[in-house]
Image (spheres, rainbow, N blue to C red):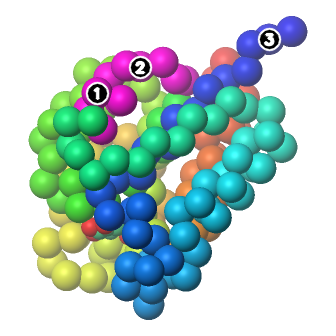
């Protein structure tokens, strides 16, 4: 039997506060609830899933550059707009990736409209709440099916 593909999901800074943090923007679901649904989707799709949350840019870079996965789904959160280090690590490992945002970053403050990672990933899903993650996981699984 073919080994399962592995998808890594990274949640960036402050996303551990989902549910409590600005619920009008980020919704009422907490990170455990979102991760639970992601785990169920992964089981359904027959893919292996690793989920990682960190508030530290260096830890995120270390996790990306381990490279022990086939596809990356990343919500870099505030680092989206500032992190050359995360951008460089995506380029260094060269794994296919989707950038996810819960809110629509193009509908908010000017500084959020600039992403340093958008042009080094396959695509972006932004503004659909927790559904942004679920659709990204579905997209990653279909991508892996048709590219392996
Ligand atoms: C976010 C959008 C970012 O601008 C913000 O800093 C976040 C979350 C989102 O998921 O909508 O922390 O990435």
Q: Nearer the viewer, mark 3 or mark 1?
A: 1
Gap in angstroms between the C-alphas marked 3 and 1? 28 Å
Helix, strand or loop for disc 1: helix
What residue does disc 3 label? 2
Residue displayed at 68% across by 38% down: 141
Depth check: give the residue in front, 14 or 87: 14
Residue at (14, 72) in percent of width and height: 111
Which residue occupies 70% across, 47% down?
39
Figure disc tally: 3
Q: Relative to 92, is 111 on the left or the right?
A: left
Can you see residue 25?
Answer: no
**In the image: residue 99, left or right of residue 111:** right
Identify the magenta region: 60-70
Q: Earlier in the sequence, mark 2 or mark 3?
A: 3
Answer yes or no: disc 3 within 8 Å of ligand 1.
Answer: no
Quadrant location of residue 16?
bottom left
Q: Of helix, strand and loop, which one carries label 3?
A: loop
Badge 1 crowding class, 10 Å Cα cut-off, few under 14, some 14 to 19, many 20 or more, is: few
| Disc 2 and disc 1 in contact, CB within 8 angstroms | no
Disc marking residue 62: 1
Mark toward the viewer: 2 or 3: 2
Q: Is the N terminus in the top left, top right, bottom left or bottom right quadrant? A: top right
Specify which label sits upstream in the sequence, 3 or 1.
Answer: 3
Front one among 148 and 58 = 58
**Upstream in sequence: badge 2 or badge 1:** 1
- Residue corresponding to mark 2: 67
- 16 to the left or right of 35: left
Q: Looking at the image, which residue sits at the far top?
A: 1
How far across and how far down the image is residue 50, in percent? Answer: 57, 35
- Above or below, 102 relative to 124: below
Density class for disc 3 (Cα within 10 Å; few <14, some 14-19, many ≥20) is few
Q: Position of residue 34 (x, y in %)?
A: 61, 62
């Amino acid at each position: 039997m073919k080994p399962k593909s592995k998808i890594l999901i990274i949640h960036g800074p402050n996303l551990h506060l989902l549910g409590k943090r600005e619920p009008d923007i980020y919704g009422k679901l907490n990170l455990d609830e979102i991760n639970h649904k992601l785990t169920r989707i992964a089981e359904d799709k027959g893919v292996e899933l690793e989920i990682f949350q960190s508030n530290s840019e260096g830890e995120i870079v270390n996790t990306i550059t381990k490279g022990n996965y086939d596809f990356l789904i990343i919500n870099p959160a505030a680092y989206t707009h500032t992190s050359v280090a995360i951008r460089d690590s995506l380029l260094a490992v060269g794994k296919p990736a989707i950038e996810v945002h819960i809110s629509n970053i193009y509908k908010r403050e000017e500084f959020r409209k600039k992403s340093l990672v958008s042009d080094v990933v396959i695509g972006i899903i932004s503004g659909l709440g927790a559904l942004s993650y679920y659709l990204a996981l579905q997209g990653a699984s279909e991508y892996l099916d048709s590219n392996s």
